[in-house]
Image (spheres, grey):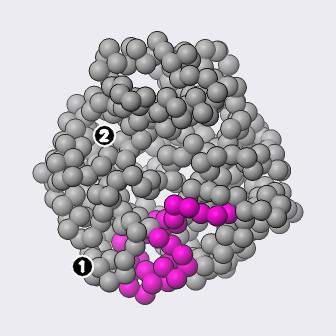
Amino acid sequence: MSFLTTAARMWLTRSAKPFCFTKEYDQNLPYTDTQQLGLYIHIPFCREICSFCPYCKVRYEKQLAQRYIDALTEEIHLVGKQQGNRKKTVTSLYIGGGSPALAVDRLAEIIGVVKIYFEITEGIGIELHPDEVTVPLLQKLKQAGVTKISIGIQSFQETFLKVLGRTSSDYETMFQAIRKVAFETVSMDFIFALPGETFALLKQDIDTAFEGGADHIAIYPFIDFSFAEHQIPLMDNREKRKLLEDITSYCREKGCYRESIWTFSKHGGKKYSSMTRENFLGFGCSATTLLEKQFKINTFSVEEYIRRIAVHHLPTALTLRFTERQRMVYYLFWTAYTTRVSEADFEGFFGVPLRKKYGLELWLAKRLKYITHHGGIYEMTSKGAFYYHYYENYYTLSYIDQMWNLLRKKAFPEKIRF
């Protein structure tokens, strides 16, 4: 456990009490009165397993995938029925993986079950591998109700694809398919801070993405998870900071709106992320749920997930019960990912002014030129965005890395403390 993350947690929660995730869960989730609720569905199947990817994934087998989707739809029923006869309004549905397109023939069925219980106001997004982006597949996605696609490019540069253990794709076919089948949002994901990477090469990737039909890009830094099977050397923090600043400046010069630390949009104002939601329900193995008073994570084991659902129990592996200050820290951490925190939204969520709880921290952040304040909005500067990334990296390796590593080995661990 990093001293930095422990000290920050104790200071921000005003308590020595750790975050304690335990082997317990609520069969009935308290989400019915929750506002600004998002939905996430995890489909873990991949044809090939990328060595750098830390997410919950397994090699695709048709029979296993069919059994999993049967369980997935049942989990949605189990949670959705808690609403009774009324539908719950939610912001969005995001389908990730894995390669969710491997379930394309049952995607309309999955979305149909979701729509029995939930009214989606901001659209449905799905992650895709570049090789999957063909006209027939995109047409199936549209027919199923998908409105946004996110394509995991990682890099258009052959050199960096080799570093990541990926092979090049037929990008011309992909671009033609995007032009022929229109979506509300076409996002392309990239990884930066790879060894030997320069801004000139990243700029080429950004230009290629926008010229090829993207109206949204996500450029994430490479994070070295302890359990990922790779030998990729890490970039120096000063180089990484300069790259992030150059990326941000260039995207803004092109007229893009910065939606979050790593994402830039041509249209602006439309959230397209599985992360930047005040509250969300997660379905599928490894999916997480964040509500007003709890955070829970589902088992990573596909077989144990199916077994738990078969007896009509939720597949929760671990649950954290929040103190008020702990929930505030979660709220601020994930909201700050958008680079903006609204005083009014914070007070609306917690019933107390933001400055009453964190006035000293906000004053210090302004003095250090990490944030600016105008119109009730605290916004990160370029300097602040980098240091947020710097802390997020510590957080990821101190908390998420340990939890995911444990859950990869044990379907239902007893507890984990941070």
In this view, the residue in front, 232 or 82, is 82
Image coordinates for residue 81, horizontal then vertical, percent: 81, 62
Q: Residues within 10 Å of mark 2 (few under 14, many from 20)?
A: few
Q: In which quarter of the image is residue 45?
A: bottom right
> Mark 1 falls on what kind of element?
helix
Please identify, in this view, whether the residue under mark 2 or under mark 1 is nearer the observer: 1
> Outermost residue toward the front?
375
* Towards the viewer: 84 or 312: 84
- Name the secondary structure under disc 2: loop
Which of these two is toward me, 208 or 214? 214
> Would you say 142 lies left or right of 381 here?
right
Relative to 310, say whether 249 is above or below: above
Residue 397, visible in the rendered structure: no
Q: How far apart are marks 2 and 1 (CA)?
A: 31 Å
Queried whether the magenta region covers residue 60, the answer comes back as: no
Q: In which quarter of the image is the C terminus?
A: top right
Q: Which residue is drawn at 54% across and 46% down?
A: 277
Question: Which dot marks residue 234?
Answer: 2
Instruction: Tell me if 248 is positioned left or right of 413 in this view.
Output: left
Where does the magenta region start and end?
Answer: 118-147
Image location of residue 301, percent across then percent down? 68, 57
Which residue sits at x=67%, y=25%? 324
User: What amino acid type should be assigned to the residue bearing mark 1?
Assistant: Glu
Q: Magenta includes 144?
A: yes
The residue where tag 1 is placed is 172
**Tag of residue 365:** none
Image height of 200 relative to 135, above or below: above
Residue at 21% x, 52% y: name it: 255
